């Protein structure tokens, strides 16, 4: 069957359920934004941000010397070597990309299982290079959480693995856009990735400008995830 890129005869039951679920999750996330309930999911977004720096470093032949995620929703990845101008934007854009991947993975139970397995594997790997107990605790907590959800999916009638993957994906996408605005545009942190990238880039664009560009790309990832999800479900 050819992909329905034009979304003809949209929307069927699965497509409506997909959009409604994303809408409900978005409202829940916004309503609980400043509560402690979302803190673990915010920290997992920070984890994906730092993991994206690490992946970019390894892909450009650098060395990852350690990672930290802090309880105040900050983080740092210690790298040596690699292509710095690719490593810097990989954090914000990478976390947005992983949000899109998780949203798309939630459209099918098989891909949700694959996403859950890859997520657990990534958490196990990072557990061994974590440099602080906040990150170690986050890894252990989410390994247990996803494993329990997976067991419930397979052995009981509580089949929510797809919804958990979708929630993490939506949370990651929204928090990535917010984080870019908060760190790079509204407050303009001089030590931010965007300010450092602006110093390296020869084009006449400061950190705020790069923040706006990265924010637009992150929003495109979110919209792209919704569109491709509808195509998959058509």
Image (tube, grey):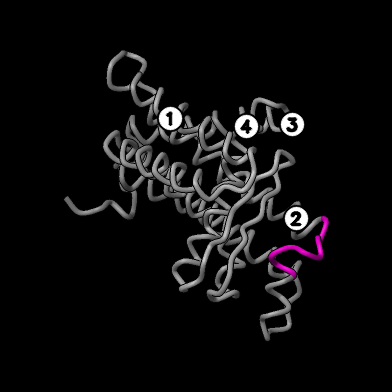
**Element under disc 2:** helix
Q: Position of residue 182 (x, y in %)?
A: 75, 51
Residue displayed at 39% across by 23% down: 160
- 29 magenta-colored: no
Which residue corresponds to mark 1?
146
Task: Return the residue found at the far top.
Answer: 157
Q: Is residue 103 left or right of residue 39?
A: left
Q: Mark 2 or mark 3, which has the lower sequence index?
A: 3
Of the numbered discs 1 and 2, the one sitting upstream in the chain is 1
Disc with the residue nearer the chain's start (3 vs 1): 3
The crowding category of the residue bearing disc 3, from other C-alpha atoms within 10 Å (few below 14, some 14 to 19, many at least 20), is few
Q: CA distance from mark 4 to mark 1?
A: 19 Å
| Rendered position, 96 above or below 40 | below
Q: Which residue is at a point 39% across and 28% down the rendered structure image?
A: 147
Tag 4 near tag 1, CB within 8 Å: no
Residue 145 versus residue 61 in the image, above or below: above
Give whichever of 232, 215 is nearer the camera: 215
Q: Residue under label 2, please give it.
A: 183
Which disc number belongs to residue 34? 3
Q: CA distance from mark 1 to mark 2?
A: 29 Å
Reading the chain from its start, which is encountered first: label 3 or label 4? 4
Disc 2 to disc 3, how far (Cα)? 17 Å
Q: Are marks 3 and 1 in contact (CB under 8 Å)?
A: no
- Residue at image point 37% right, 44% down: 118
The label on residue 29 is: 4
**Closer to us: mark 3 or mark 4?**
3
- The image shows residue 87 at horizontal and vertical percentages of 57, 68
Residues in magenta? 187-195
The residue mark sitting in front, 3 or 1, is 1
Q: Nearer the viewer, mark 4 or mark 1?
A: 1
x then y, percent, for residue 51: 53, 54
Tag 3's secondary structure? loop
């Amino acid at each position: 069957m050819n992909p329905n890129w034009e979304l003809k005869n949209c929307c069927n039951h699965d497509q409506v359920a997909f959009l409604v679920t994303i809408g409900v999750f978005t409202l829940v996330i916004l309503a609980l934004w400043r509560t402690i309930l979302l803190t673990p999911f915010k920290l997992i977004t920070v984890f994906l941000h730092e993991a994206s720096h690490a992946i970019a470093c390894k892909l450009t032949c650098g060395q990852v010397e350690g990672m930290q995620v802090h309880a105040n929703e900050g983080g740092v990845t210690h790298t040596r070597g690699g292509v710095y101008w690719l490593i810097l934007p990989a954090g914000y854009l990478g976390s947005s990309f992983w949000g899109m991947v998780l949203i798309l993975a939630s459209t099918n139970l098989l891909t949700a299982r694959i996403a859950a397995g890859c997520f657990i594997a990534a958490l196990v790997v990072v557990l061994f290079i974590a440099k602080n107990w906040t990150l170690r605790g986050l890894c252990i907590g989410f390994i247990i959480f996803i494993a329990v959800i997976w067991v419930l999916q397979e052995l009981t009638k509580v089949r929510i693995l797809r919804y958990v993957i979708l929630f993490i994906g939506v949370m990651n996408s929204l928090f990535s856009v917010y984080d870019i605005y908060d760190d790079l545009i509204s407050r303009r942190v001089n030590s931010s990735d965007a300010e450092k990238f602006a110093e390296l880039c020869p084009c006449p664009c400061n950190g705020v400008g790069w923040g706006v560009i990265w924010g637009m790309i992150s929003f495109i990832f979110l919209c792209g995830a919704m569109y491709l999800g509808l195509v998959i479900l058509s």
